[in-house]
Image (cartoon, rainbow, N blue to C red):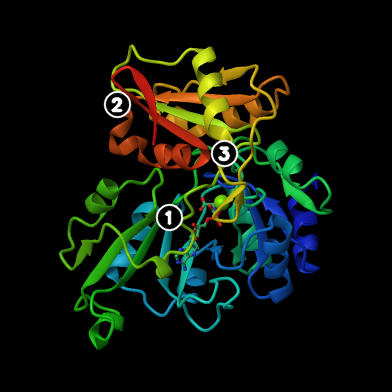
Amino acid sequence: MKIGSIAQAIVALQRGDVVGMPTETVYGLAGRIDQRSSIEKIFQVKKRPFFDPLIVHVSDIQMAQKLTTIWNPLIEQLTKVFWPGPLTLVLPKSTTVDDLVTSGLQSVGIRMPRHPMALELIRQIQVPLAAPSANQFGRTSPTRCDHVLSEFLDYESVVLDGGESEIGLESTVLAIFPEDKNSEAATQEFMQGRWNLSILRAGMILEKDIRVALKEFDNFKFLPSIEKKMAPGQMKHHYMPSIPLILFEQNDLMEFPSELEVLKLAEQEFDRLPDKIDEVPIKKPKSFHHAERIFLDFDPILAARRFYSQLREASSNKKVDVLYMVINEGHREEIWKALMDRLTKAASLRFRKNRTYWELI
Ligand code: TXA
Ligand code: MG
């Protein structure tokens, strides 16, 4: 890939190629939803398994409405408060959405990003763009243009340089579905129906923010989880850096492992890991000479913004064998939830302090 203009990106999209698109969360690898070959290309270029559905990006509300069979005051309110922005709504899909985009599901993820370049691109091409994060499957998401370039060195197309992503973590994915699947009322446009909401992926828009936005509504409830087949993208390992990461959970701020301790634990435990978990290849250190600690920012907003960049930067140091991070009780607060989710999935090994030793979890 190379850096290009919006005009060049349009040309590439018109001929069925996929392009790098900046958004406020992470960079996306975008293709037109009305061309099956473009959608196929997204999966091929990313080496993404077909069972994991794509998010469709729109530049206005009318575009979103055409993708789904429901649009009610509750959805209207959520889009009013959070769009454009880092909230993906999973809604029943209309027939205009290709099954390839949704991995055969009856629902579609829709989001209006707030990066001006993404909005401009979609506005100009006049077609919604399906876009997963612009990284090889299972790996760290890109938050800068050069990250995208390094993920797709051999693929000939363009990426728009939109600077560093403001949020730095992927959008909150919120599924909305009728409480009673057979209820006629539920599919009507007005308030009669009752709705179940469920956060399928944590992001920087929190459940409590959604509750505040919906304070005038009493026709919904949050479910902590939904059937696995309705949310196929929940891999245990994901977002993995090219150098393996180890996570240490401390009970007490004074406990953290020395570099030597980290290397010793790594040497003991990496051997026992399989080469692949959930289709995601697990990288293992070749030697155990140097471990580097990555520090999270104290401010959760800044920590989120910088996290993926930090992982990439630390993994570019060829002298480092393993990366490690230390987290504590304070990180259990809701504002840290999205980052802790990514961290846990990015880590190949996790340890918790158990009195005198680090216990593998
Ligand atoms: O912030 C973001 O959401 C970024 C930017 C580029 O918009 N995109 C992104 O896409 O993170 P991706 O493909 O890396 O993650 C999409 C997530 C996956 O976990 C997928 O399983 C879930 O959204 N998803 C998409 N459509 C869905 C659907 N119909 N039902 C359930 N989950 C869905
Ligand atoms: Mg992704």
Q: Foreground residue, 243 or 11?
A: 243
Residue holding disc 1:
83
Which amino acid lies under the numbered mark 3 shown in the image of this protein?
Answer: Ser
Which amino acid lies under the numbered mark 1 shown in the image of this protein?
Answer: Trp
**Tag nearer the camera, 3 or 2:** 2
Res. 293 in view: no
Looking at the image, how many numbered discs can be counted on the residues? 3
Label 1 sits on a secondary structure element that is: loop
Residue holding disc 2:
330
Q: Foreground residue, 152 or 126?
A: 152
The mark that comes first in sequence, 3 or 1, is 1
Label 1, residues with CA under 10 Å away: few <14, some 14-19, many ≥20: some
The mark that comes first in sequence, 3 or 2, is 3
- Label 3 to label 1, Cα distance in Å? 17 Å
- Label 3 to label 2, Cα distance in Å? 25 Å
Label 2 sits on a secondary structure element that is: helix
x, y percent for residue 49: 62, 63
**Tag nearer the camera, 3 or 1:** 3
Instruction: Please report the residue visible at 28 percent of the width from the left and 69 percent of the height from the top.
Output: 73
Task: Return the mark for residue 165.
Answer: 3
Label 2, residues with CA under 10 Å away: few <14, some 14-19, many ≥20: few
Write down the quadrant of residue 248 in the picture.
top left
Label 3, residues with CA under 10 Å away: few <14, some 14-19, many ≥20: many
x, y percent for residue 186: 26, 80
Write down the quadrant of residue 243 in the picture.
top right
x, y percent for residue 137: 63, 52
Would you say 247 lies left or right of 161 here? Answer: left
CB within 8 Å, label 1 to label 2: no
Instruction: Please report the residue visible at 49 percent of the width from the left and 47 percent of the height from the top.
Output: 170
Would you say 7 lies left or right of 58 here? Answer: right
The mark that comes first in sequence, 1 or 2, is 1
184 versus 61 height, above or below? below
